[in-house]
Image (tube, helix red, strand yellow):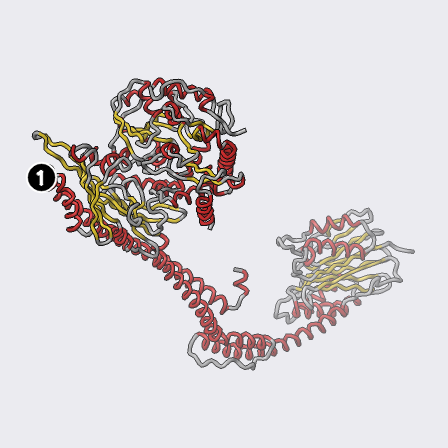
Amino acid sequence: MEIISKKSLASRIVFYVAAFCVLLFLISLSVFYFFSKKSIEEKTIENALEITQNTVLKTEQVLISSEKILNNYRWLIEKNIAYADSMEAYTRRILQMNPEIIGCAIAFKPDFFPEKGYYFSPFTYRNKDLLVSTQLGNEEYDYFVMDWYQIPATLEKPYWSEPYYDTGGGNALMTTYSMPFYSSNNGDKELAGIITIDLSLEWFTDIVSSVKILETGYASVISRNGTFVTHPNTDIIMNQTIFSFAAEMQSPGLRQIGRNMQAGKTGFEDVVVNGRDLIVSYKPLLTSNWTLAVVFSRDEMYAPLRQISLVLIFIIVIGMALMVFIVKKIVEQQIAPLKCFARSSIEIAEGNFNTELPDIKTEDEMKELHNAFVHMQTDLKKYIKNLKETTSAKEKIESELRIAREIQMGMIPKIFPPFPDTPEIDLYAMLEPAKEVGGDLYDFFMIDDTHLCYAIGDVSGKGVPASLFMAVTRTLLRSVAPKQRSTSEIVNNLNNSLAIGNESSMFVTFFIGIINLKTGEMNYTNAGHNPPIIIHADNKSEFFEITQDIPIGLFENYDYTEKTRVLSENDRLFLYTDGITEAENWDEELYSDERLIKCIRAINSLDPTEIVMKVARDVVVHVNDCQQSDDLTMMSIIYKGSKK
Amino acid sequence: MKCLQTFILCVLATSLFAQAQPNELTFTPHWLPQAQFAGYYVAQEKGFYADEGIVVNIQHPSASVNAFQLLADKSADVISLFMVTALQARSDSFKIVNIAQLSQHSALMFVSHKKNGIEKLNQLDGKRIGIWKSGFDEVPKALIQSNNYEVEWVPILSSINMFMIGGIDAMTVMWYNEYDQIINAGINPDELNIFNFADYGCDVPEDGLYCLESTYLQRKPELEKFVEATMLGWKYAKNNPDEALDIVLAEMKKAHIATNLTHQKWMLQCMLELIEPGTKNVKKGELAETDFHKTRNMLKESNHINGNISFDSFYKPVLK
């Protein structure tokens, strides 16, 4: 099937059509062969039986007429049995009246006529056109022990002799019909002798030999003892019996047929002789107890059928070859436009939407395909045109966003360490927006020589609006913070500025702290932002208290609280946005505050850069390539103490 | 072609040596051509006689004139005979001598259709038994006589037709010949009751080679060559049965005798077995003295022969 599947469509169609046709032909041929065989068999058998019957009738007629002749003359002989010298005349008369008889003897029992001697048997036979009469019987020819005399005399029944060759007259195949005749002795019937007539079996052979059935079928006559009287093979005649032949051919079946013949049965049987499957139809000749057999080969019976079948197979093979050729041509012609369509589709795929389609003149499936291609060409042209426009617009937006990102990123400090000349403090921060631009922000700057202001925030929403809000917030922070020392004031100012005209109700969570680098005192305000973590010098960490204050930008004049904390030497702060704790993995599990504090506690480092990077790596491990949904912003500050 | 050559040779031999040339012998088997005499035909055909420097004419008896008669009128120099026939002749003062004993065993048997109900030998008493008219009847008659059975002997020429048609109750047959003819006429072996003479103390040797005593005395060298070549013929037939059978069949065809390969094959096999001495203390071709005495005594007891016939006077082996 793999080979077939690699062939062309035309080849596949032809293959399946041809396979179906072959199957159909095979079935048809088998059915034809089966029924024809049966019909031929029936007709041949019928013919064989008819031939057998007719041949038996023909041969029986001659034998029966011979029997009648002797019956008629026996009466005359018995009536005139006293006249020995008239016997020769009877034998001559029989021959004169019956040209088919070639010899006749009236053989008397020993010393029947004392004056005639021990043997007395007038015998007349034909010698060419003459009738020659003589006496049979002498010491050399003791006819009393001859079958033709002895058997009917013993059985007192007429007897057809086994066929024999006439040693005196040209080696002709003969048979003798013998019949006892009787004399009356004081009223008792006594056997007086045997009257015989000799028949040439030439006529018999002619009748039987004329039988032909099929190519080599023939008829044969088998004598009482199984001897072949006639047979197409003359070497077999009188030399073989059916039994010796069966032994020579090693055919037990033939022997059984011979025995059936001897039993006077009529039959129709199959037998294997010398490797040939033969059919034998046989019927007894009731007069002589011989059997006529019609023999023919089973192979020959089916030979014409085999010939016709071979011719049919030849025609089918040629027809199939022609059919395959023609069907292939037709199919190839019909599907030829498909190749053009394939080429056209490749060109279309390569962008040549105006490529020429094959010209279809028929109104069929191929035309439908053509129309579909035309439609596709038109739609593709429209689509590509739209796509170009959309892509152009998108590219423009993306370009603008890239610029916006650069601007946004430019707004936050990115130089670390930011204060190399201020040993009391070190700081590191990072911001990774989820989109081109984000709403997170961080910032830090020195208000004066001793005060560091730092802040982190997260604008509600994402993208361009959030980034704009973030920019406004950061700008406001930079303008407000340097003038204030109170984080709550800074936040209040920011809130009031952002809340005015905030129609889109955007807000920002915000944490801001100011550290006095001399004292470590830190005041801070948390406007709804995630509580930062403080990592003490002994590495113990904790979240700041949760704020009660709301994010900025929501309500004008909201008064934010300010808290104070004193940082010890090497205390570290870790600030972050909810993008960290709410980072999701594929199972939608959050990074969480617990994992964050656990991570922080495990870091044990004084380097803010290392703290931020390790947390960043831990978040990456957690999300495991799951798409980032929110901006990630972290800031870490270490207070190293006053360096007075 | 070979047949033609043989024929021409025979004609030449006959014309050249019509006056009984010293190296010419006429041999007559005791029956018509068949595998029973395969050794002689093979010796003739293969040139074993010619190799010995003798010319042998094989002349068969007719259906009515037997070999013995041919020997008597000196038409034949050597004949094959049953030993019993020879002993009878000798008893009748016919001076014949045995120069070689070929068949060491009896192949004689009575057969009867099982349907006749003759299961034991004594059931033959009072029955009609077919027997050859042309002779070979001494042992059957002696066997029946020794058992004091009264049977009606029905003389038969040569066919098995009387037996087949039920004209007789039993028939005397030769194991190698008529028995197989009966089988080849459609009777199965298991449908026959067989009385093998050997089983009833009559295992007497059969086919032997005989000549007149005068011939023996005058032509011993040729006789010796004849027997030597004949034994060689039998040996060849044993080793080449198919070829031997072809020779036999050709001989039979020449004589217009109906036969077939199956029957002649059977006969040849039987003859080759009969030639083997078996447990008898003689070589092939020799006559055992015990066999001689047994046969002679049996014939005496059955009154087939009179007087004393000595082994030495009867048996004159020519083989060295």
Horizontal placement of A589 versus A245: left or right? right
Vertical position of residue A30 compared to residue A355: above or below: above
**Residue A611 point in image, percent of width and height:** 78, 54
Residue A309 versus residue A533: which sits nearer the camera?
A: A309
**Residue B104 point in image, percent of width and height:** 45, 27
Residue at 76% across / 70% down in the picture? A410
Vertical position of residue B317 compared to residue A270: above or below: above
Residue at the extreme front of the image, as rendered: B19
Q: Callout 1 environment at 10 Å: few (<14), some (14 to 19), or many (20+)?
A: few
- Identify the element where label 1 is drawn: helix
Residue B129 versus residue A268: which sits nearer the camera?
A: B129
The amino acid pointed to by label 1 is: Lys
Res A323 → quadrant: bottom left
Q: Is residue A49 visible?
A: no
Residue at 29% across / 24% down in the picture? B118
**Residue A192 point in image, percent of width and height:** 15, 34
Q: Is residue A129 visible?
A: yes
- Label tally: 1
The C terminus of chain A, quarter of image: bottom right
Horizontal placement of A339 versus A467: left or right? left
Q: Chain of mark 1?
A: A
**Residue A167 point in image, percent of width and height:** 30, 45
Horizontal placement of A26 versus A495: left or right? left
Residue at 26% across / 49% down in the picture? A201
Residue at the extreme left of the image, as rendered: A187
Residue hosting label 1: A79
Residue at 49% across / 37% down in the picture? B22
Residue B293 versus residue A331: which sits nearer the camera?
A: B293
